[in-house]
Image (cartoon, grey):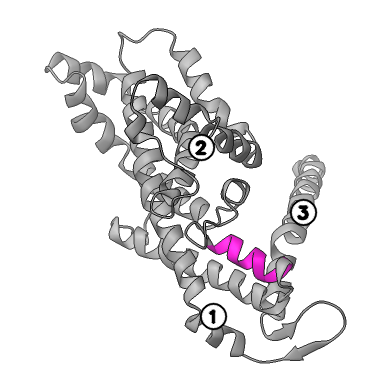
Amino acid sequence: MNSTLFKPKAKTLVSFLSLGIIVYSFIIIIPLVMSLRYSFFNWSGGPNMKFVGINNYIELIKDMDFWLSFKNNVIIIVLCVIGQIGTALILTSLMMSKLLKFKEFYRTTIFIPVVISTVVVGFIWNLIYSKDFGLLNWLLNSLNLKALIKPWLDDPDIVLYSVTAPLVWQFIGLYLIIFMSAIQGISKEIFEVAELDGATGIKKAIYITIPMLKDVIKVTIMLCIAGNMKVFDSIYVMTGGGPGKSSMVMAQYAYNNSFTMFKLGYGSTISIGILILSFSFIFISRKLMGGNKDD
């Protein structure tokens, strides 16, 4: 009798899982396998494919443009970990304050950029950074800070920082929600006892909140690394990797090789290289943060 009751549930569960697995396979697994296969060929599209073995990977290791784009990705990751997660932690501490009013409004407002398309974000910040009619330079001019006015997207020395600012702005809300959700799972008695002992404001954040969120912070750092290793859309819209190659990232370098120069085989090799470097970066960061097999 019990088996009869559970059979429809099992079938429903299998059907839902099967649909998810099929979709995941078509979106992730099959393209990954095809990309791995193409990476061993000299291929520019069409039926003619020349097998070259690991020559593409040897070329990739020697490709200084690829390593330049990797360096840019690393800089963006460091800035985003500090900017996104650091700012989210500060805002989370402020949200816990009993003095702050309209918390739901602030939380919703901060989260809204997360659901905006990164392409749209790129266009918005392109207008903000515009040298001639951009909001940023207009504001600096209005405040009589003309010395700070710069061609934000045309100066190779600052462009990487300029394209990182929208990334930080857009995803602060994501980590804020993660931290707020994690805090809700912490007993309120802990914070009440801390307040009775005199731990308020910054002290409560440093000695209570952050230590209690240690494991969540580790997860958010790995999410931040994974997300910014494949960053592409907003930077492509704002600068196209320029000026020169000063804001080129790995995903755009793969895109340029594949769809601009039609070096589809080498572009696939770059994609596999991004995957390997991403896994390596996450693994190293996990070890540095004290990750172990029991995590």
Q: Is residue 256 magenta?
A: yes
Instruction: Name the residue at 60% across, 33% down.
Output: 124
Q: Percent from the top left, x then y, of residue 107?
A: 48, 20
Write down the region rendered in magenta.
Answer: 250-259
Structural crowding at the residue carrying mark 2, measured as other residues with C-alpha within 10 Å and reported as few (<14), some (14–19) or many (≥20): some
Q: Is residue 203 above or below residue 172?
A: above
Q: Is residue 237 above or below residue 63?
A: above
Eye-nearest disc, 2 or 3: 2
Instruction: Name the residue at 84% across, 86% down.
Output: 48
Q: Nearer the viewer, residue 271 or 16?
A: 271
Eye-nearest disc, 1 or 3: 1
The residue carrying mark 2 is: 131
The residue carrying mark 3 is: 23
Q: Nearer the viewer, residue 99 or 126?
A: 126
Q: Is residue 3 above or below residue 132?
A: below
Structural crowding at the residue carrying mark 1, measured as other residues with C-alpha within 10 Å and reported as few (<14), some (14–19) or many (≥20): some
Q: Nearer the viewer, residue 158 or 30?
A: 158
The residue carrying mark 1 is: 60
Q: CA distance from mark 1 to mark 2?
A: 36 Å
**Amino acid of disc 2:** Lys
Q: Is residue 109 magenta?
A: no
**Amino acid of disc 3:** Val
Which type of secondary structure does the marked residue at label 1 adopt? Answer: helix
- Looking at the image, tell me whether mark 1 or mark 3 is earlier in sequence order: 3
Query: Dots 2 and 3: beta carbons under 8 Å?
Result: no
Q: Nearer the viewer, residue 267 or 276?
A: 267
